[in-house]
Image: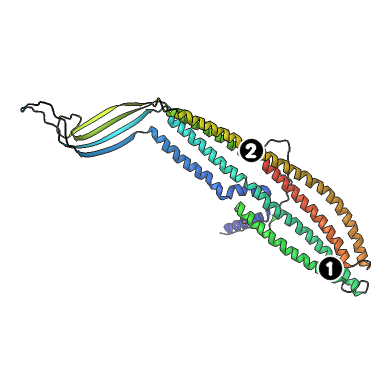
């Protein structure tokens, strides 16, 4: 019992720890695994298995039972029959009960063609599910980097708050000893209250994004979650590797199996049959009594002329292939345009980051001077806060551009279909 309790505690502790950190790749995996649409893969496979079993029954013998009772206005009679004839005509009320067994011997390959078509259909439908699940990555990127940006901004805001609190202590001391004007500390206190409001706003926004991401990946995420800051690399030289391209090919493969079905429909079909019956009359119509009987034989069916129906169906499928080629061309064009836009965004953010770092160095020097001037009563608290805010905004811009760069890289890889590399 103690061992079980210990293991349970370890398990729960692991879960709590596991929820404290979350990576972008884990979000991708969880979204594809837990999103309700993912269930369709198993359902489609199960449905397809039933459909295949139904098609295979075409090769099994078919058993039909039939019975009927009739009354007819006239029956067969021998012409010019003499009065001493021993042949009596059948009764006008007749009864039949039969059992017929049909066994397909040769179907021209139509059953196998149907099986191939159904299997191709399954691959296409499952690939469509994969495509739909892949598109969730764009939403994951949106929520993940929105949370990450708030996470980074909060750290900056904490640093700004600490800087203000330190300066406030110094200003209060200056006011107390008459070095600084009265109420110089009030401006700093008001700024600290504004920071508290910003903390509240950030927390509300973070909770909103976390709830959205939680629903998307199908996992409960703690509001105290710490998202990993991914190191994403991009390769501008690789080819597009999206599941949509596989889907286009599978659709064309499915059309080819449909063409095979059309061709096999015109093939000759041979089957054997046997019918056993009991009725009055039997096969001997002149024997007016209940009899048992049977009939056995072969049937050949061959649709030699279908008014060019098969030819027109094949032409329709060829047009469908051309439509798929057109859709693929549009997809590749739109993807290429989007990749160009994301690449431009990556280059732009990289240039912004370089200038942000220079701006921050300059702002730090200005703030250092302003802090010294404030402590010596040369400038007001408002002037100091202005310079502190300028530095904060510069650092905030750097953090924002860093996250936007990662966001653009993640989107680039998502659009291209590149595998995640951290």
Q: In this view of the protein, which residue sits in the foreground, 376 or 287? A: 287
Q: Position of residue 192 (x, y in %)?
A: 80, 67
Image position of 164 (left or right of 324): right
Q: In this picture, is 130 found above or below 160?
A: above
The mark that comes first in sequence, 2 or 1, is: 1
Q: Residue beneath label 2, please?
A: 330
Q: Residue furthest front?
A: 307
Is residue 22 visible in the rendered image? The answer is: no
Image position of 27 (left or right of 165): left
Q: Which mark is residue 229?
A: none
Circle 2 SS class: helix
Q: Residue beneath label 1, please?
A: 188
Q: Position of residue 252 (x, y in %)?
A: 55, 33
- Considering the image in quadrants, where does the N terminus appear? bottom right
| Residue under the point 89% across and 60% down | 367
Circle 1 SS class: helix
Q: Residue furthest left?
A: 84
Q: In this view of the protein, which residue sits in the foreground, 297 or 315? A: 315
């Amino acid at each position: 019992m103690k061992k079980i309790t210990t293991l349970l505690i370890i398990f729960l502790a692991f879960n709590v720890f596991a929820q404290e950190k979350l990576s972008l790749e884990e979000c991708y995996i969880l979204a594809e695994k837990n999103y309700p649409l993912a269930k369709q893969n198993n359902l489609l496979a199960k449905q397809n298995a039933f459909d295949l079993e139904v098609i295979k029954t075409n090769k099994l013998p078919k058993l039909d039972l039939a019975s009927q009772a009739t009354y007819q206005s006239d029956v067969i009679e021998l012409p010019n029959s003499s009065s001493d004839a021993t042949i009596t005509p059948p009764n006008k009320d007749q009864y039949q009960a039969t059992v017929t067994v049909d066994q397909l011997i040769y179907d021209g390959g139509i059953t196998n063609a149907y099986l191939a078509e159904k299997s191709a259909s399954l691959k296409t439908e499952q690939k469509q599910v994969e495509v739909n699940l892949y598109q969730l990555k764009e939403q994951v990127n949106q929520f993940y980097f929105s949370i990450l940006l708030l996470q980074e901004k909060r750290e900056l805001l904490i640093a700004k708050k600490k800087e203000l609190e330190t300066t406030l202590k110094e200003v209060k001391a200056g006011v107390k000893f008459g070095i600084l004007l009265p109420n110089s500390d009030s401006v700093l206190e008001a700024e600290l209250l504004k920071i508290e409001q910003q903390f509240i706003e950030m927390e509300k926004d973070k909770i909103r994004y976390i709830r959205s991401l939680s629903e998307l990946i199908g996992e409960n995420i703690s509001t105290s979650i710490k998202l990993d800051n991914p190191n994403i690399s991009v390769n501008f030289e690789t080819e597009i590797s999206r599941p949509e391209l596989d889907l286009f090919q599978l659709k064309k493969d499915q059309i080819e199996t449909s063409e095979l079905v059309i061709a096999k429909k015109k093939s000759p079909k041979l089957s054997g049959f046997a019918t056993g019956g009991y009725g009055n009359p039997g096969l001997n119509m002149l024997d007016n009594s209940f009899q048992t009987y049977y009939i056995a034989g072969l049937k050949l069916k061959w649709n030699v002329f279908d008014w060019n129906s098969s030819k027109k169906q094949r032409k329709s499928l060829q047009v469908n292939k051309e439509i798929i080629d057109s859709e693929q061309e549009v997809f590749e064009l739109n993807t290429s345009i989007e990749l160009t836009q994301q690449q431009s965004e990556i280059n732009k953010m990289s240039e912004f980051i370089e200038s942000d770092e220079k701006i921050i160095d300059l702002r730090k020097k200005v703030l250092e001077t302003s802090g010294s001037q404030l402590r010596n009563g040369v400038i007001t608290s408002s002037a100091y806060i202005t310079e502190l805010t300028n530095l904060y905004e510069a650092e905030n811009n750097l953090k924002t551009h860093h996250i936007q760069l990662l966001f653009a890289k993640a989107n680039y890889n998502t659009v291209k279909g590149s595998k995640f590399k951290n």
